[in-house]
Image (cartoon, rainbow, N blue to C red):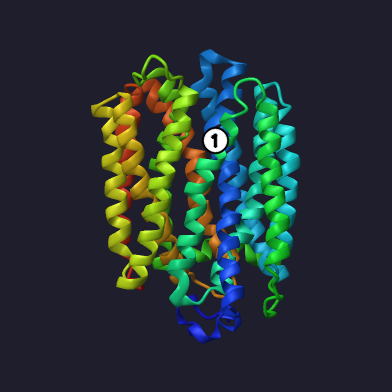
Amino acid sequence: MSRPATQIPAQDAPSDRLGGGVLARLLVMLAVGNTAMYMVYMGVGQVLLPLQVELLDPADKVANLGLVSGVSAVFATLFNPLAGLLSDRSRRRNPWILGGGLAALGALALLGAMRTLLLVTIGWCLVQAMMNVYQAAITAVVPDRIPVERRGLASAMVGVGTPLGVIAGVTLAASFVPDAIRTGYLALGAVIAVVAVLFTALVREQRLPAVEAVPLVRQLAAFGTALKAGDFRWAFIGRFLMMLGYFMVTLFQLYILQDHISLPADLEPAEAMTILSPLNAVCMLLATVVGGLLSDRIGRRKPFIAVSCVLTALGMMIPLVSPSWTGMLVFAVVTGLSFGCFMAVDTALVTLVLPSADDAARDMGVLNIANAGPQIIGPFLASLVVASLGGYDALFAAGALVTVVGALSVVPIRGVR
């Protein structure tokens, strides 16, 4: 029978047997590996894919982007826990990181060549599937190998990948707009493939200790069992709501800049993205590091998460009150600070409430449904809000409401302060 993760003594963790230099290299490569992952997600999701969809049918771009993003996110939801389950069964992570990264290159090359909405949807589905094979394995490295007392630092290093990935991914993707979108896909694919090779070459691993073999059908059924653990379930709900509110707005940011915000006369929407995204990401980076370290020092996670959700909601109300370039700049700063702190501290909290130590990748894969699930619901919900409930003002208000509700989800968590 598996022991709960929160009951494993720190000295029993495999990472405690690593030397300081090896642990430092592992932390650096976790940052690099997650940066490459978010370069793909944000470079494609915020720049290349919206422009590709708009070129196919400018009049229905909002509804079409919602359709493509939502359908493809179903694959993300399915493949992430499944890939985690398979890496748990193999007792290895590196082969899945390498295989997912290399396969993502091929899928991105295919997506860039697509010229119909149906084929674009299929191509983005394949990219999501392969990227989630990569993500499920690299996410499990933290509970596998990092001691409990260093989880905040490790989570900060993982969280650094989001802002750095946004800066690098959006900047790289925008450099290929508007005439070389296909080359942009290839460039992002090359990044994830090279990083996957480097990670597996520099971060050597030993096979995890064998556990009792469980039939695959029973392991699939165990996905639902993980959510029966109360603390884990509330952590799942909180992550889901925060991501839903955030992605409802950010996935449509290019269209918001095109159709809703009063930009300076000499500033094009794509150029505005290359300013907003790095600004948001720098703020996110600062908050990720500071939030992770402070939560380690204070020994508390829940207050950081609740305040981050509320501040994100307040940030989303700024463009509603001031639909201007200045309003968007303030929006980028506030949401960057709050979302960065949330991701660092929430990741640390999650690793402390995992239901099973022997099934860490599976359980983290279940939790990652809370990352991918909002990408299913968010685009459909956002396009419905924009079309039926008052345009982009209603979208900002809806995103703020969802994130405020997410702040309440940390209250019932008992195993972590």
Which quadrant of the figure contains the N terminus? bottom right
Q: Residue at x 58, y 43 (%)?
A: 39
Give x and y (percent) for residue 318. 27, 33
- Asked whether the viewer can see residue 409, the reply is yes
Q: Which residue corresponds to mark 1?
A: 171
* Element under disc 1: helix
Q: In terms of image quadrants, where is residue 90?
A: bottom right
Number of dots carrying numbers = 1
Q: Residue furthest left?
A: 321
Q: Position of residue 283 (x, y in %)?
A: 38, 47
Residue 40, image x, y percentages: 60, 42
Q: Is residue 336 rendered to the left or right of residue 205?
A: left
Residue type pointed to by label 1: Thr
Side of 114 where 407 appears, left or right? left
The picture places residue 335, in percent across and down from the top left corner, at 34, 43
Q: Quadrant of residue 390?
A: top left
Q: Is residue 299 visible?
A: no
